[in-house]
Image (cartoon, rainbow, N blue to C red):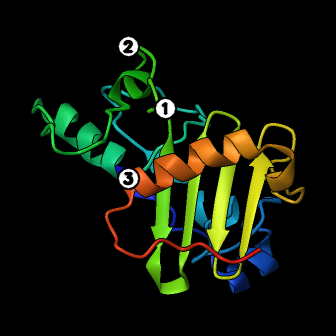
Amino acid sequence: TFLPGADDGTTPIIGRWFDGTQGYRGFKGDVYDGGLRVPAIAHWPARIAGSRTSQLQLDLTDVHATVLAAAGLTPPTAIDGRSFLPPLVGSGPFTPRPFQVWYLPEGNQAAVLAGKWKATWRRDSTALFDIERDPSERLNRWNDHPEIVARLDSIRRREDRRADHPHPSR
């Protein structure tokens, strides 16, 4: 059994009442971690040891690949997902992809995470965060690291198949 806690982040009401974002910035519908992080529970008594926690960074395509692997099937090569079955059952590590990209077209938002750096493009602002030193995404380092911004923007544009990319004026 795999039970994700929410579909894409904590709602503002639940987040404020119950500290649902655990100090991360943003809520459901945001490209900040408070809107992207979702708790989950995996239960498979014959294969998964109980009473463990993990901080794996996954996305829905990884869930797809993992469910297929658990069923003994090979995931299609057309998806980016990577199975996290090995760490679930204690047989090996999970190797995350070198970057993750999120798009929320309804809010004209995008984000790219690569290593410790996360860039966000939101409605009328841009930001770059060092999420190892600033996990709450408060200190904008956009102007301090133009080479990192350029690399993450290149990933965003390459991976985003939409014709119009969010690019607020600064």
- Front position among marks 2 and 1: 1
Name which residue type carries label 3. Glu
Q: Quick one: label 3, few (<14), some, or many (20+) residues within 10 Å?
A: few
Q: Which residue is mark 1?
A: 98
Residue 170 located left or right of residue 110:
right
Indicate whether 60 appears above or below 54: below
Which of 92 and 116 lies nearest the eye of the viewer?
116
Which of 1 and 4 lies nearest the eye of the viewer?
4
SS assignment at label 3: helix
Query: Which circle's residue, 3 or 2, is located before the other in the chain?
Result: 2
- Marking on residue 91: 2
Q: Which residue is mark 3?
A: 159
Query: Which circle's residue, 3 or 1, is located before the other in the chain?
Result: 1
Looking at the rendered image, the quarter that the C terminus falls into is bottom right
SS assignment at label 1: loop
Indicate whether 169 appears above or below 140: below
Residue 5 located left or right of residue 145:
left
Q: Picture coordinates of residue 54 (x, y %)?
A: 59, 34
The structure residue drawn at horizontal position 78% and vertical position 65%, both measured from the top left corner, is: 25
Name which residue type carries label 2. Ser
Q: Is residue 124 visible?
A: yes
Indicate whether 148 appears above or below 40: above
- Front position among marks 3 and 1: 3
Indicate whether 82 appears above or below 15: above
Which of 28 and 154 lies nearest the eye of the viewer?
154
SS assignment at label 2: loop
Q: Quick one: label 1, few (<14), some, or many (20+) residues within 10 Å?
A: few
